[in-house]
Image (cartoon, rainbow, N blue to C red):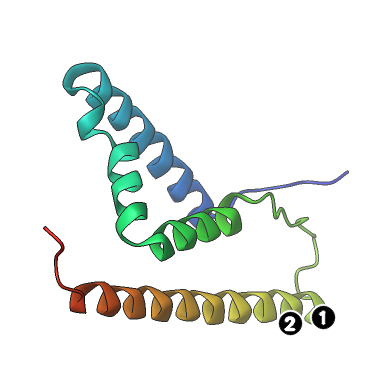
Amino acid sequence: MKKFTMSTTGLVLTIVVIGLALYDLVLVLFSGTGSSISNFLVNVGIKSPVMSFCLGWLCSHFFGGHMHEVKDDMKDKDELNRLRAMNENLLLELNICYAAIEAADKKVSHEPDSK
């Protein structure tokens, strides 16, 4: 029988996302849609589309259904090496995403305001 568990990071991120959703619901109910998290994300996406792309990319990695089967014998070196390689690739992709955000922010900050 397969047994699946959630990592501590996954649990914390799930709790944070549920908390933000509830907070957003309260904001919309009592303050209107102008103060919602969704409105903020839309405005950020308009100013810097790279930011929206990176947030979506991160969510797909965190919540994309990449469940790992928990084995009784986690000392299997091939499995540990595979997981380490996956972690290294994720860190590399995060660094690339961070560099893209920095480059976009520099580009946006050097453009004169059209107002």
Image quadrant containing the N terminus: top right
Residue 5 point in image, percent of width and height: 66, 48
Which label sits on residue 78? 1
Q: Decide which of 114, 76 is in the foreground and name it.
A: 114
Label 2 neighbourhood size at 10 Å, few (<14), some (14-19), many (20+)?
few
Label 2 sits on residue: 81
Instruction: Estimate the x, y position of residue 54 in percent, counting from the top left.
Output: 47, 63
Residue at the extreme left of the image, as rendered: 115
Within 10 angstroms of label 1, few (less than 14), some, or many (20 or more) residues?
few
User: In the image as oriented, which residue stretches furthest toward the front?
Assistant: 114
| Amino acid under disc 2 | Asn
Q: List the single residue furthest toward the top.
A: 29
Label tally: 2
Above or below for 13 versus 35: below
Per the image, label 1 sits on a secondary structure element best described as: helix
Identify the residue at image location x=26%, y=23%: 28
Find the distance from the CA under tag 2 to the CA under tag 1: 5 Å
Q: Residue at x 80, y 67 (%)?
A: 73
Question: Residue 33: which quarter of the image?
Answer: top left
**73 sits left or right of 58 in the view:** right
Q: Are marks 2 and 1 in contact (CB under 8 Å)?
A: yes
Q: Looking at this view, is 1 or 54 the one in front?
A: 54
Query: Which mark, residue 47?
Result: none
The picture quadrant where one finds residue 52 is bottom left
- Write the residue at 29% across / 48% down: 43
Quadrant of the drawing holding the C terminus: bottom left
At which x and y percent is residue 24? 30, 31
Check disc 1 and give the amino acid type.
Asp
Residue at position x 38%, y 32% from top? 21
